[in-house]
Image: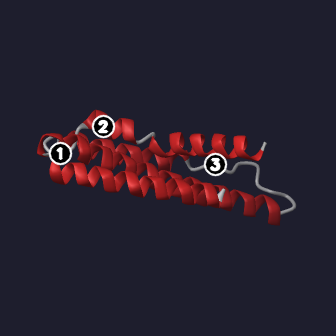
């Protein structure tokens, strides 16, 4: 899973670089490019938070013979990240395009899905 996350973050970095070039050289698309960059950044933060949480859950259940009954996956923190990005776009519509931010928040799950599928096909 660390390899998958590393590849996904690398792809996100290249995508953010491309968005930055669009932001710099195409002034008409600046608002859309900035929105996509904000959404992808929130998506990367969410992926890192989820990975950290999965590691923590694995440690709790591996090291403890009687694990706690309720251990959450930290959904509230990831939702708060998306809410923060969308509220920033809502408050500053002259800088960020809100639909672009919301669509880009799904970047990492889609990239992870495609990479996992490609890895599965390669292994079989």
Nearest the camera: 60 or 116?
116
Please tell me which of labels 2 and 1 falls first in the chain: 1
Determine which residue is flagged by label 2. Answer: 100
Numbered mark located on residue 72 in the image: 3
- Tag 1, which secondary structure? helix
Disc 3 element:
loop
Q: Position of residue 77 (x, y in %)?
A: 48, 51
Question: Badge 1, how many Cα within 10 Å: few under 14, some, many 20+?
Answer: many
Query: In this rendering, which labeled residue sits more in front, label 2 or label 1?
Result: 1
Q: What whole-number distance in Å separates the C-alpha atoms at marks 3 and 1?
A: 38 Å
- Mark 2 and mark 1 in contact? Answer it, CB < 8 Å: no
Q: Give the position of the N terminus as an image quadrant.
A: bottom right
Quick check: can you spot residue 116?
yes
Are there few (<14), some (14-19), or many (20+) residues within 10 Å of tag 2? many
114 relative position to 83: left or right: right
Does 45 sit left or right of 35 as displayed?
Answer: right
Task: Name the mark nearer the viewer: 3 or 1.
Answer: 1
Separation of marks 3 and 2 at Cα, in angstroms: 30 Å
**Circle 1 residue:** 30
Percent from the top left, x then y, of residue 101?
32, 40
Please provide percent x and percent y for residue 30: 17, 45
């Amino acid at each position: 899973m660390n390899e998958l996350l590393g590849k996904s973050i690398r792809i996100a970095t290249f995508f953010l670089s491309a968005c930055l070039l669009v932001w710099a050289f195409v002034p008409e698309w600046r608002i859309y490019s900035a929105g996509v960059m904000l959404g992808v950044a929130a998506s990367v933060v969410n992926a890192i938070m989820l990975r950290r949480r999965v590691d923590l859950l694995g440690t709790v259940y591996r090291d403890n013979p009687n694990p706690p009954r309720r251990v959450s996956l930290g959904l509230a923190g990831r939702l708060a990240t998306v809410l923060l990005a969308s509220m920033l776009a809502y408050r500053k519509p002259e800088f960020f395009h809100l639909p672009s931010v919301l669509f880009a928040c799904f970047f990492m799950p889609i990239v992870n899905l495609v990479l996992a599928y490609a890895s599965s096909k390669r292994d079989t």
